[in-house]
Image (tube, grey):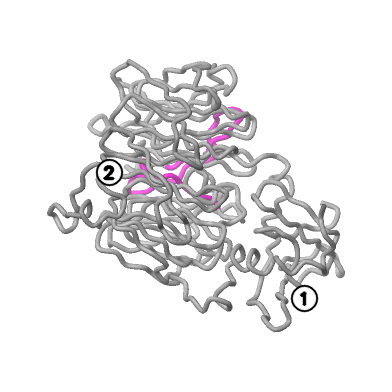
Amino acid sequence: MNRPLLQNSRLLIALLLAQGIAAGVHGQKPGTLLWKLHHPVASSPAIGTDGTVYIGSFGGWVSTTINKSISNWKRSPLGKSGSSIFALDGKTGKKKWAFNLGGSEGLTPAIGSDGTVYVGPSNKSIFYALDGKTGAKKWEFKWNTGSRNRSMLSAIGDNGTVYIGTGFTVYALDGKTGANKWEFTPGHHARCTLAIGVDGTVYIGADKPDQKNKFYAVDGITGKKRWEFPTTNLNPTLPTAYSSPAIGYDGTVYFGSMDYNEDGNYLFYAVDSKTGKKKWEFGSQYAAKAFPPAIGTDGTVYVVTNNFAYALNGKTGRKKWQLKGTYFSPAIASNETIYFGSNDNKLHAVNTRTGVRKWKFETEDWLTSSPAIGANGTVYFGSWDGGFYAVYGSAGPADSAWPMFAQNAQRTAREADPARTSRVDPDLNLHVSRVLLEQGQITIQAVAKPMNSIEMVELEFSSDLTHWRTQNFHFPINLPLNIPLTQDAQFMRVKRIGD
């Protein structure tokens, strides 16, 4: 039962962590190292709803920058085990359990609503479902087409169906049993991570042997093709491919490619999810084929190429700003910060509105791992220096359509449900100040252009960024207000009265 707004003081830590204002309590500066694990990790981490961090690791390691073999297997507290999936305590980095995948690299895991961890090795024709608490195997799925796990991770539907790309075939598996529901053959390689729309449509990018590549929309229940998106002019000397897609609140599907236009610019696309028709394209001198985009709370689409990061208007494709450098798939926090890994060995924290750097954290090698942002603002990522890092980031994930690789820290690659998207107002933002410790209060302010002189908003609370509840606490737009810390929830937002 929900308690009255002013009676529960236990929201202190939860709201501090989720809103990124715990610096007033812990005295930590954004970019501070919380812990480091000496273990080779190149895939992107996933975070369970209980804060457990799951990572896939390499069975061998060569540093790209130092250009010599390194001995992080001997330094690793996890031990040498080939490619494995590890469960770590998100607060300390201590190992909870490990499972040997038997390949050369453990891919990025995805986590189901019941905590099941879905993962496979990069070079074996096998896929696993593991108990998230113990690491015990629930089931395995094998295929015999001579391919390997080409997809970077699985996608998980709202009904629990698990979709995996294996190179030549996309499979839909029963999440409970591993039984094969259907399969779809898109072409030679389903290289990108799949994405799932709010209506269950599965989006697949593929390379075909004749280089007439396609981006497909497939019915998630039947496996039947709904539409395909053709490429334009292809360079026959390049292995063309599509990046993993991101899906906006209006259903627009965004993805990069190695297609190019008459000017010789590589193309990033915005496509209507219902019809497959192109809405707009953005041309760049450098391709955005490999790195999934992210979407901010105002609908801005963040795209990385080989030499630039771009912020694009999600409606028109117009460039807002650009940042020179080689960056990798970003993640967006709720305090207008976007994180990029880079080949300059740094994690960059950048202002989402301006493109101005806020701070940076340096490692000893490239950061190709897409960061995962915990509810408490911790940023988790791996580096090619053989380390896995937890860095204080000061704010939880942005409440946007697609704030990070595979949509969320559980890496389900599934678009947010209608109950949530219908209530999102990109023009309305909640600002939260530092905590007033003595009074046990926070200062909040709903910032927006009011529709009338005394427009009111109300607070909503959530523990999972999907299910929201309200206490009917109303206050005016643009008026700072001190309130006691309330509710057993990790996240909060505001909505206009009557929405």
Q: 205 or 62, which is in the foreground?
A: 62
Q: Residue 46, how many percent across, how many down?
A: 46, 47
Q: CA distance from mark 2 to mark 1?
A: 50 Å
Q: 126 or 68, which is in the foreground?
A: 126
Q: What is the quadrant of residue 490 in the picture?
A: bottom right
Q: Residue 468, how many percent across, how many down?
A: 74, 50
Q: Which residue is mark 2?
A: 58
Above or below, comparing residue 336 to residue 412 in the picture: below
Q: What is the quadrant of residue 210 in the picture?
A: top left
Q: Which residues are magenta?
A: 268-295
Q: Which residue is mark 1?
A: 481
Q: Secondary structure at mark 1?
A: strand
Image point (49%, 24%), residue name: 228
Image point (37%, 48%), residue name: 284
Image point (12%, 54%), residue name: 68
Q: Amino acid at mark 1?
A: Leu
Between marks 2 and 1 in the image, the one whose residue lies nearer the viewer: 2
Q: Is residue 468 left or right of residue 189?
A: right
Outermost residue to the bottom: 438
Above or below, comparing residue 429 to residue 41 in the picture: below
Q: Amino acid at mark 2?
A: Phe
